[in-house]
């Protein structure tokens, strides 16, 4: 992935732990969802390089505002997922479980970008934790 493409498509750098850095919107019909969100918010939504059925959402905000992705829905109840930055996905997963939540998808690498895990809070809300690491494999 070229540096210019990588900068446009990776989760934005955060000023600190606990910041929202990325979001994903599942869709049954990607073209319909792209048209809806593009017209509603003026977002620029384009194919994500190297990934099938996954689009990059450029929200047009400052570097501190997150961009996101849009993907083909994987299950009927799949919600929008927000990604929150943490220093360590491994430590965050342990803390989630200690606080009564659960890990739904364990630590997963996004090559040359970082790691994420999908978790569920005590109210059955799904979210993801994100660790920046350009050495991820």
Image (tube, helix red, strand yellow):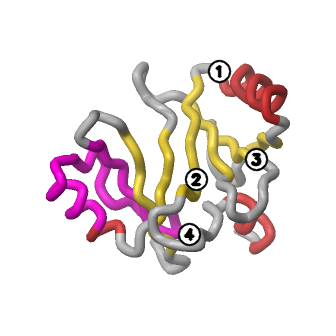
Q: Which residue is mark 1?
A: 29
Disc marking residue 113: 4
> Alpha-carbon distance for marks 2 and 4?
13 Å
Asked which secondary structure carries label 3, the reply is loop
Query: Which residue is at a point 22% across and 62% down the rendered structure image?
Result: 95
Which disc is residue 22 wearing?
2
What segment is highlighted magenta in the picture? Answer: 92-121
Whether residues under marks 3 and 1 lie with C-beta atoms below 8 angstroms apart, the answer is no
Marking on residue 59? 3
Element marked by disc 2:
strand
Q: Select label 2 or label 4 by which is in front.
A: 2
Q: Secondary structure at mark 1?
A: loop
Counting other residues with Cα less than 10 Å from the Cα at mark 3, is it few (<14), some (14-19), or many (20 or more)?
Answer: some
For discs 3 and 4, the disc positioned in front in the rendered view: 3
Tag 4, which secondary structure? loop
| Sooner in the amino-acid sequence: mark 3 or mark 4 | 3
Question: Residue at image x 63%, y 44%?
Answer: 69
Q: Which of the 4 quarters of the picture holds residue 12?
A: bottom right
Which badge, 3 or 2, is on the more N-terminal residue? 2
* 8 sits left or right of 23 in the view: right
Q: CA distance from mark 3 to mark 2?
A: 11 Å
User: Which of the two labelled residues, at mark 4 and mark 1, occupies the earlier sequence position?
Assistant: 1
Left or right position of 46 against 136: right
* Quarter occupied by residue 46: top right
Up the image or down, 100 lies above or below 71; here it is below
Instruction: Give me the C-alpha separation between circle 3 and circle 1.
Output: 20 Å
Where residue 85 sits in the image (x, y, percent)? 47, 64
Counting residues from the start of the chain, the first of labels 2 and 1 encountered is 2
């Amino acid at each position: 992935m070229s540096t210019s493409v990588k900068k446009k498509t990776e989760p934005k750098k955060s000023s600190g732990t606990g910041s929202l850095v990325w979001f994903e919107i599942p869709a049954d019909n990607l073209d319909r969802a792209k048209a809806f969100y593009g017209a509603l918010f003026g977002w620029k939504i384009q194919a994500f390089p190297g990934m099938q059925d996954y689009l990059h959402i450029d929200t047009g905000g400052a570097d501190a505002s997150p961009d996101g992705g849009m993907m083909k829905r994987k299950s009927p109840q799949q919600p929008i997922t927000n990604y929150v930055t943490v220093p360590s996905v491994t430590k965050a997963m342990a803390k989630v479980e200690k606080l009564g939540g659960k890990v739904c998808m364990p630590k997963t690498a996004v090559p040359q970008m970082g790691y994420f895990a999908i978790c569920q809070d005590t109210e059955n809300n799904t979210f993801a934790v994100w660790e920046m690491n350009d050495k991820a494999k």
